[in-house]
Amino acid sequence: MGWLEGRFEESVMTTTLEQAINWARESSMWPMTFGLACCAIEMMATGASRFDIDRFGAGAFRATPRQADLMIVAGTVNFKMAARVRRLYNQMPDPKFVIAMGACTCGGGPYYKYGYNVVKGVDLVVPVDVYVPGCPPRPEALLEGLMRIQDKVRAMKDLTRGQPLEVPIPSRTGFTLLPPELNDPDPQKAVEKQNAWAKRNKELGTPAKA
Amino acid sequence: MTATDLVARLEEKFGAKIKSKNLQAIDPFVVVEAVDLLDVCRFLKENADLGFDLLHDISGVDYLEPDPKKAPKAGFDPHVEVVYHLQSFKHLHRLVVKVILPRWKDDTPGQLPEVPSLTPLYGSADWHEREVYDLVGVYFPGHPNLTRILLSEDWVGHPLRKDYEFPLEYHGIRGR
């Protein structure tokens, strides 16, 4: 704080409003209780006494998205759950952050090739701030991910720069819209059209044998 | 009662309706037609000597080699099997009943093959049949509520069929 620093008594501290807000925000990230699969066990271990996520101010796991500002997606997200994940994300108040915990949420993990029901990465559903890989990641890794979120909060300049809060970086939603010729009111026919299209694309992509 | 005796009882009662049998397998099994399944299971359950009062599991198996080059060497014709594991609490013996079906009814792709439901006999058949219907695509006429049990209701296709292809997108989410 330049020339203001140290000109007052010892109990007076000077800072900017933005830094003060960011400091308050990063020291009380309230995560949402959001365990989907086995990674949730590791998330619980992170919350328990040995690793104690409360040391970083993020131990208050809320049972409702309206009181949470950090979503730790811990576990496999399948297509049936994806709509609920997006809905819960939309219900969280701004500013909100997402940690993708585990291999499944980072990119499909072991279900990448043959998992017909698994979303290939939760970043196809909600924008993700920090990826924590591992199967499942150690509690230290999750704490590290939390600290990276705190770094992100510390660098927020929403007061001075007018940065829009509702779009965290990266602002990728993953929403896919197929061209209209691949859609059909009858879902069965639509799927047949899409499969034929994908098959033709694959054939076009394979090099011809010499 | 050993498996040999069980199958002998069945053959005595049903004769040529028992299409084939295998007593050397770890789980000895008999194969019946879909139309005879309910009669056979009713006999197995209600006969006092047999007393098969527990239906452990219903599985659906899709026998298909999707690769046309490997198909001649696969050792089977394309078909779908439904496997019933039965046990008796009273006599402590087991038997497996299999039903062999075409992959599609009348060989029309999209028409699911049909097996009569076992829900009038065994309550446990309810969810198992829903699961087989959901993942393998076998239709069970007579089931009280034959809807998808694991996948969402608007899912297209039956994923454990060998020729199933993943959806390109599902509700705006990229599938593959």
Image (cartoon, rainbow, N blue to C red):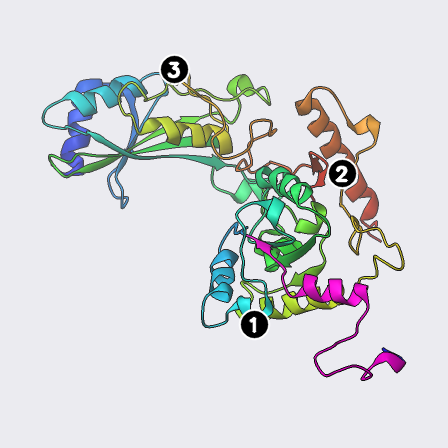
User: Between A63 and A190, which is closer to the camera in this rendering?
Assistant: A63
Which residues lie in the magenta part?
A3-32
Whether labels 1 and 2 share one chain: yes
Distance, label 1 to label 2, CA atoms, is 42 Å
- Residue that carries the numbered disc 1 in the rendered image: A140
User: Between B115 and B118, which is closer to the camera in this rendering?
Assistant: B118
Q: Amino acid at mark 3?
A: Gly
User: Whole-percent x and y of residue B133?
Assistant: 47, 28
Identify the secondary structure beneath mark 2: helix
Q: Nearer the viewer, mark 3 or mark 1?
A: 1
Q: Quadrant of residue B100?
A: top left
User: Residue placed at 79% from the left, 55% from the top?
Assistant: A170
A170 left or right, relative to B155: right
Q: Is residue B98 above or below residue B43?
A: below
User: Whole-percent x and y of residue A9?
Assistant: 75, 82
| Circle on res. A1 | none
Q: Amino acid at mark 1?
A: Glu
- Residue that carries the numbered disc 2 in the rendered image: A198
Identify the secondary structure beneath mark 3: loop
- Residue that carries the numbered disc 3 in the rendered image: B142
